Image (spheres, rainbow, N blue to C red):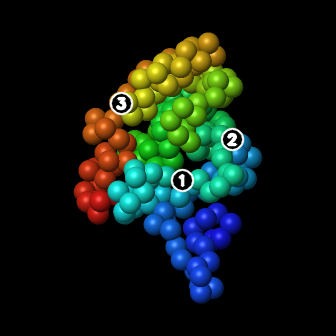
Amino acid sequence: WLACGISKVDGSGGFTFSDHRLVIPWDNDNFETVAIQRRTVENIEKWQGRKYVFGRGRNTASPFGMAEFLELQSKEDVYICEGALDALAIKVMSGATSVGLPGKGSWKSEWASAFRTCEVTIALDEDAGEEAEKICADLWAAEVKSLRREIPPDGDWGDMLRDWTGDNRGY
């Protein structure tokens, strides 16, 4: 709890907890957890829009779900989206294989070769214009089977999942 930043020791020796209480483990390609990302489900204004945070000095070397994707026997259709929750939302709503980038501007060209035999859907949010173009260029260079762009109709895959399930708790 202390090492990943979920809690800290307060002045009296007790523990205090961050508003970022949803914990998302990020694994490397060998299923080893290399980073913990936290997300707030409330008080977003207090955190000045920073819904997601990684612990200090921690970062992820692979997209969320990449180890699972690499382990699949048939790697035909895959969605590339922003973040773990969007990747999970796509998987829940469609059953499709999805990997989530660790944040805006985090795409690494060397990841493209992993998708070489795939039909890839770039499912980044609407505001990801230049990044989506870079990813497309890298994937075409890696000779993917096909490539298409799908923007979540409600602006965000997580919001779409919330609407799909009827859950209106505000996160």
Tag 3, which secondary structure?
loop
Q: Residue 126: which numbered mark, if any? A: 3
Residue 108 vertical position relative to residue 67 in the rendered view, above or below: above
* Nearer mark to the viewer, of 1 and 2: 1
Residue type at mark 3? Glu
Asked whether the beta carbons under mark 2 and mark 3 sit within 8 Å of each other, the answer is no
Quarter of the image where one finds residue 74 = top right
Residue at 64% across / 29% down in the picture?
A: 108
Residue at 43% across / 32% down in the picture?
A: 124
Q: Which residue is mark 1?
A: 53
**Looking at the image, can residue 143 be seen?**
no
Q: CA distance from mark 1 to mark 3?
A: 22 Å
Image-based side of 158 in relation to 144, left or right:
left
Q: Which quadrant: the N terminus? A: bottom right
Residue at 35% across / 41% down in the picture?
A: 156
Residue 141 vertical position relative to residue 7 in the rendered view, above or below: above
Quarter of the image where one finds residue 151 = top left
Residue type at mark 1? Val
Q: Which residue is mark 2?
A: 61
Label 1 or label 2, whichever comes before in sequence order: 1
Q: Which quadrant: the C terminus? A: bottom left
**Mark 1 Cα within 10 Å, few/some/many (few <14, many 20+)?**
some
* Nearer mark to the viewer, of 1 and 3: 1
Image-based side of 164 in relation to 125, left or right:
left
Q: Residue 136: which numbered mark, if any? A: none
Residue 61 at what x, y percent from top left? 68, 41
Residue type at mark 2? Ala
Residue 141 at what x, y percent from top left? 62, 12
Q: CA distance from mark 2 to mark 3?
A: 24 Å
Q: CA distance from mark 1 to mark 2?
A: 15 Å
